[in-house]
């Protein structure tokens, strides 16, 4: 089947040579390095760290104004300084 198709007819628009018989052949020629496991990204690790810090603060009775690391740390520092669990807005 692939032999009957004209070269370049199935290439992606970004293909520099436009001489592949199939779209798959075109994609393979680009040697794309795809990462199928997106759970190992730095963004998800930072997100998980923020949520973990928020969860720990809530377990201590502290109510941060948000889930970002800066707001959680601020609430913990205020709580430590005053000796009373911070209740954010």
Image (tube, grey):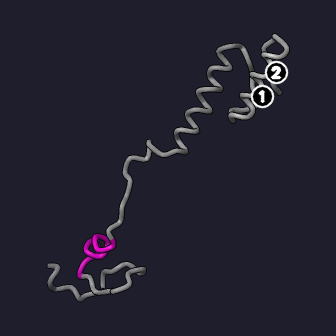
Name the image quarter holding residue 4. Answer: bottom left
In the image, taking residue 31 as reference, residue 78 lies left or right, namely right
Location of mark 1 (residue):
74
Label 2 environment density (alpha carbons within 10 Å; few <14, some 14–19, many ≥20): some
What are the residue bounds of the magenta stretch? 21-30
Residue 81 located within the stretch drawn in magenta: no
Name the image quarter holding residue 55. Answer: top right
Considering the whole magenta stretch, tell me its main secondary structure: helix
Label 2, secondary structure: give it.
helix
61 vs 6: above or below? above
Name the image quarter holding residue 58. Answer: top right
In the image, taking residue 32 as reference, residue 75 lies left or right, namely right
Rendered-image quadrant of the C terminus: top right
Q: Residue at x 28, y 70 (%)?
A: 28
Label of residue 54 in the image? none
Asked whether the residues under the numbered discs 1 and 2 touch, taking CB atoms below 8 Å apart as contact, a structural biologist would say yes
Q: Residue at x 43, y 47 (%)?
A: 38
- The x and y percentages for residue 88 are 81, 25
Q: Residue at x 38, y 81 (%)?
A: 15
In the image, taking residue 28 as reference, residue 39 lies left or right, namely right
22 vs 69: above or below? below
Label 1, secondary structure: give it.
helix
Q: Residue at x 73, y 34 (%)?
A: 70
Q: Nearer the viewer, residue 31 or 62?
A: 31
Location of mark 2 (residue):
78
- The x and y percentages for residue 19 are 28, 86
In the image, taking residue 45 as reference, residue 63 lies left or right, namely right
């Amino acid at each position: 089947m692939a032999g009957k198709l004209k070269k370049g007819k199935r290439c992606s628009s970004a293909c520099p040579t436009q001489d592949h018989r199939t779209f798959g052949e075109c994609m393979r020629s680009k040697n794309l390095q795809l990462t199928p496991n997106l759970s190992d990204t730095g963004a998800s690790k930072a997100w998980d760290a923020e949520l973990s810090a928020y969860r720990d603060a809530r377990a201590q009775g502290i109510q941060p104004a948000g889930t970002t690391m800066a707001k959680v740390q601020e609430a913990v520092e205020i709580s430590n300084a005053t000796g009373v669990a911070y209740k954010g807005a």
